Image (cartoon, rainbow, N blue to C red):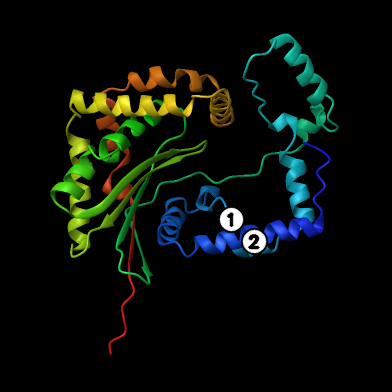
Amino acid sequence: MRNLLLDPREFESEKAVVLEELSMGEDEPWRALSQEVQLALFPRHPYRRPVIGFADSLGAMGVADMRSYYARHYRPSNAVLVLAGDFEPRRALELVRERFGSFPGEGRKAAGAERPAFRPGATPPKGERRITILWDDEGRRLCVAWPTTTVGTEDDWALDLLSTVLAGGKLSRMHRRLVIERRLATSVSSHNDTRVDAGAFWMFLECARGVDPEDLERALWKEIGELSRKLVPAKELDRAKRMLASGEAHENETVTDLAEQLGEFAVDAHWRLALEAPARLAAVTAQAVRRCAKTYLGEERRVVGWCLPKARPSR
């Protein structure tokens, strides 16, 4: 957290690597499509920006810009330290205070001197928004997103279950009905992405060859509408809970995994949520899942993005 060299030559070399990675991502249709949807989903909030940034702003960044950012954010008063493993707590805390307690500029005056930057609220779209991008292949890709809630709320756990019921594995509703039975799509997936200020619920579908994209869309809205009207059967909800619990156990197999989970929740909400997750997930009811589908996944709140083939010139 101090003594960072930021050698100018090394900085420029690493920046070139990141710019190349960004350029490669722009050649990937799913990334390009989801980025356009995200820009519409968060019209003013910083969440609209991709994590890797934009090429023009990254290209203009210099060593002084990075050093200033590092000084503002990479300091003990803005960090969470997680210790996990076989150690004696009292001695460990002594060592933490020894290593981190005497950083320059970490006094009470310095900690409160800088006001946090203003961030506009994450306001939902005013009515459905539609986006179409064209790509030089035959794929037809559908990406839909809705603004949702913040991390660690009761609705967060319910949305995890909703996502699993819809597209969690080959026994999920949408894979079974849209991919296997009706053959409208070749792949379906969903993702509940909650964050500190807001969240998003994502759906990704690849349209099958020869299928009208409008038919796939109608089938998707039917599945969403059914979840908004009807309770998920107990057997189906239990399967989704067991899937999520199994995944959670697998992700926390090692001491490092657990430390990372604790750190993530500590930064985003509260570290205790990492330990409470199994109980909170188990307590979610079918009524809560239906309420979340009805509250968040409405037609008037969604951003619908299509990636369609470019028209080929006639010969």
Residue at left 23%, top 54%? 185
Q: Which sits in the foreground, 73 or 302? A: 73
Quadrant including the N terminus: top right
Determine which residue is flagged by label 2: 57
Label 1 sits on what residue type?
Answer: Gly
Query: Can residue 54 be seen here?
Result: no
The quarter holding residue 291 reads top left
Contact check, label 2 and label 1, Cβ < 8 Å: yes
Label 2 sits on what residue type?
Answer: Ser
Total residue callouts: 2
Q: Which sits in the foreground, 27 or 101? A: 27
Left or right: residue 124 compared with residue 263: left
Residue at left 80%, top 50%? 6
Left or right: residue 83 compared with residue 1: left
Left or right: residue 223 compared with residue 255: left
Quadrant including the C terminus: bottom left
Residue at left 26%, top 39%? 166
Location of residue 311 in the rendering, given as x and y in whole percent from the top left corner: 31, 77
Left or right: residue 302 compared with residue 258: left
Marks 2/1: CA–CA distance: 7 Å
Location of residue 4 in the rendering, given as x and y in whole percent from the top left corner: 80, 43
Q: Which sits in the foreground, 152 or 25? A: 25
Location of residue 133 in the rendering, given as x and y in whole percent from the top left corner: 38, 67
139, above or below 77, in the image: below
Location of residue 107 in the rendering, given as x and y in whole percent from the top left corner: 82, 27
Which of the numbered marks, if any, corresponds to residue 53?
1
